Amino acid sequence: MDRTIAFFNAFFEGKYYLTVFDGIMNTLTLTAVATTIGMLIGLIVAIIQVIEKPKHGGISLVVVNFLKLIAKVYVDIIRGTPAVVQISFLWMVVLGPLQIPRVLVGGIAFGINSGAYMSEIIRGGILSIDKGQMEAGRSLGLTYIQTMREIILPQAARQTLPTLVNEFIVLIKETSIIGFIGGMDLMKAANIMIGSTYNYEIPLLMVALIYLCMTTIFTRFMRKVEKSISKER
């Protein structure tokens, strides 16, 4: 009890609640940036992976094959290496010397990492749509891109939404490793409080509860979105 009282005295007197607030905001910022980048990369890579090879050959076939190779190598490398190695490499080797803020570097790194997984999710959603949908769109005079945008992707989005929500939740929790490059997040805030108060239990439980609240709120919100989409079908 005395340790608990001592911790909360230090928590308010040392204004560690501001540290926790900064950690929450940085975690949400990281997640938002990473999700935006990841969705963009994932969508582009998924479309490249499912695009049909030109039957007439020529330069267009070479370009498509090259893009498919790049997409495959990207997915294999990202899925085959730990996220902590990727973020450390991006910070120490690529972007660190440019004096870019750690939060932005983290957002880019997590976005690149998440993009590989999202591409597989989106690709699966696209492939789940009957091929006749694409043929119908092309027969109406739509281009491949127009058919994909107007017909295929909206249906694929409904199919993949639950899995993408799970990926987003994983991303929220995965941002805790930004501390490896000195970035501030909830876990870093916990470490700061532990280092100052020598109390391990309360800071870790506090951070765990905050993560749980964030993921629970988002999950319930997305369930309502899923239900509303299902009603519109």
Image: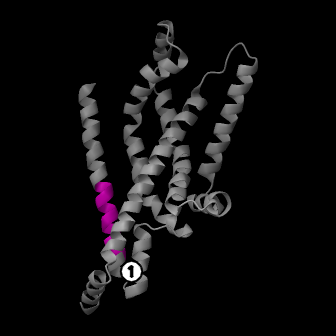
**In the picture provided, is 122 more to the left or to the right than 231?**
right
Q: Residue at x 46, y 60 (%)?
A: 175
- Give the camera-side residue of 158 and 34: 34
| Colour basis | one colour
Give the mark count.
1
**In the picture provided, is 170 more to the left or to the right than 68?**
left
Whether the magenta-drawn stretch holds residue 148 is answered as no
Q: Residue at x 50, y 67 (%)?
A: 183
Residue that numbered label 1 is attached to: 193
Q: Which residues are magenta?
A: 204-216
Q: Residue 74 location in percent, x, y?
A: 64, 44
Q: Residue 71 location in percent, x, y?
A: 64, 38
**In the picture provided, is 97 more to the left or to the right than 102?**
right
| Residue type beneath disc 1 | Met
Q: Quadrant of residue 171?
A: bottom left
Q: On screen, 27 above or below 8?
A: above
* Predominant secondary structure, magenta span: helix
Q: Residue at x 35, y 80 (%)?
A: 201
